[in-house]
Image: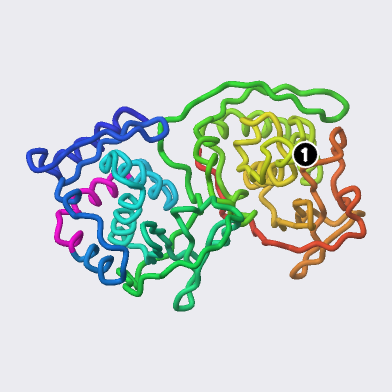
Amino acid sequence: MPRILLLSFLLILGKALPASNCEEITIPFFTEQVPIQYQTDLLQIPRPEMTELGLRAYFRQMSTTKYDVLIRSLQQARRAFRLNDWLYYKLVRQVLMQIYGQHEPVDRTLSAWFIMSQSGYDTRLTYLEDEAYLYVFTMDEVFEAPIIQDRGRSFINLTEVRAGRAPQRALYMLGFVPNGDGHAFTFAFRDLPRLRPMLKRQKVSFFYQNEWHALEVEVDENIAAYMEDYPIVAETQYLEVPLSPQLFQSLIPPLREMIKGKNEWQTAELLAAFTRSAFEYKEDKAYFGCSKPMVAEEVFIHPFSDCEDRTALFFQLAKTLLPIPTLVVAYPDHLTLAMALPAAPGSTIPYEGRNYYFTDPTGPVRDQKVGQVPRGYEQKPFTVLKHYSMSGVKQEK
């Protein structure tokens, strides 16, 4: 993060929160050291009995503390670093890990429930004996995570969001709702966080027009750290995560130079040649041992990538270099794109009065041709997951 931004952040904290009345700690958060202030009266509220009455009383007692000092500090960090909801929750958890020290996990979960409720989210709490689980209302599609329904809303278990197919257990749900009008928690990355980048320069080569072309780019390996334990969300959300400014500035100009004078079909071919041949292919389960969707930047960071990952990269390149209407197309075991290219012979998908031509980002590996159904999928059914007009979509420079 630029030095001036960190200095401004510290000055804001210093003015807003008098140090004489607060404890201050420094939290390691990815590549940053985040100063956080809080009042110790939070720690004086004892763990409640795990009953309806006990948990209600706990929330009331926490509400009598000067909890606003901690929340104000967390929110200032959130604004300074432009954290999305998931990264804000991770910061909350890391702060509570340090504040509560040797306390049991249930103490941190209960305090996280209180903090997230007071941060504006609609939460639920489930419990059983000496265990508690924090749920939050979301409208996002999330996979391999425990979800409950209440009052027509879906709530995801943040405490065990990556629990996968863990055995289901009967839990009590607390009838008390702290913030029933609270807003939805979203996992979307509308912008990348403004955390100090962890930069790495690397060379990529791709096969186009019967020869290899080499580029040198700069990637932010922090993005792989953000995504390492990210919950598995809808496929299109990965497509929408932008490139880092460093990758954008090192990759887009040379590609833009290469497409000078080319029409839309030729541009699509160049982008397909790049995503097909510049990276090694391997399925997630073969490399990671589990499902691991990637955002575009991760394709440069990890040694292997698959169709979903290449689709995210092609989408990010196209929204700058070929911003024409685009469909995200899903087969049962393959993800690809189709674009509203000018009329020509080829396989099309009619959609809302336009014909869309397949621009598969995955293969064949050394073939730049687009406009054909992906090889092996000619007779298979597909679904259009989403339509993007691409109008007004710009990458931050």
What's the residue at 47%, 43% (across, down)? 192
Give the side of residue 287 with respect to residue 28, left or right: right
Residue that protrudes farthest toward the left in the picture = 20
Residue 36's quadrant in the figure?
A: top left
Residues 112 and 128: in front is 128
Residues 28 and 8: in front is 28
- Provide residue 271's location: percent of width, then percent of height: 74, 39
* 72 inside magenta stretch: yes
- Provide residue 232's location: percent of width, then percent of height: 59, 52
Q: Is residue 172 visible from the viewing direction of this image? A: yes
From the image, give the main secondary structure of the stretch colored magenta. Answer: helix
Q: What stretch is highlighted in magenta?
A: 61-77
Q: Is mark 1 on a helix, strand or loop?
A: loop
What's the residue at 47%, 59% (across, down)? 157
Give the side of residue 319 with respect to residue 189, left or right: right
Compared to residue 367, the image places residue 89 above or below, namely below
Residue 168's quadrant in the figure?
A: bottom right
Residue that protrudes farthest toward the front in the picture = 129
- Provide residue 16's location: percent of width, then percent of height: 15, 45
Q: What residue type is labelled 1?
A: Lys
Give the side of residue 62 with respect to residue 134, left or right: left
Residues 101 and 3: in front is 101
What's the residue at 20%, 66% (across, down)? 60
- Are there few (<14), some (14-19), or many (20+) residues within 10 Å of tag 1? few
- Provide residue 361's location: percent of width, then percent of height: 77, 43
Residues 155 and 379: in front is 155
* 88 inside magenta stretch: no
Compared to residue 372, the image places residue 54 above or below, namely below
The residue where tag 1 is placed is 262
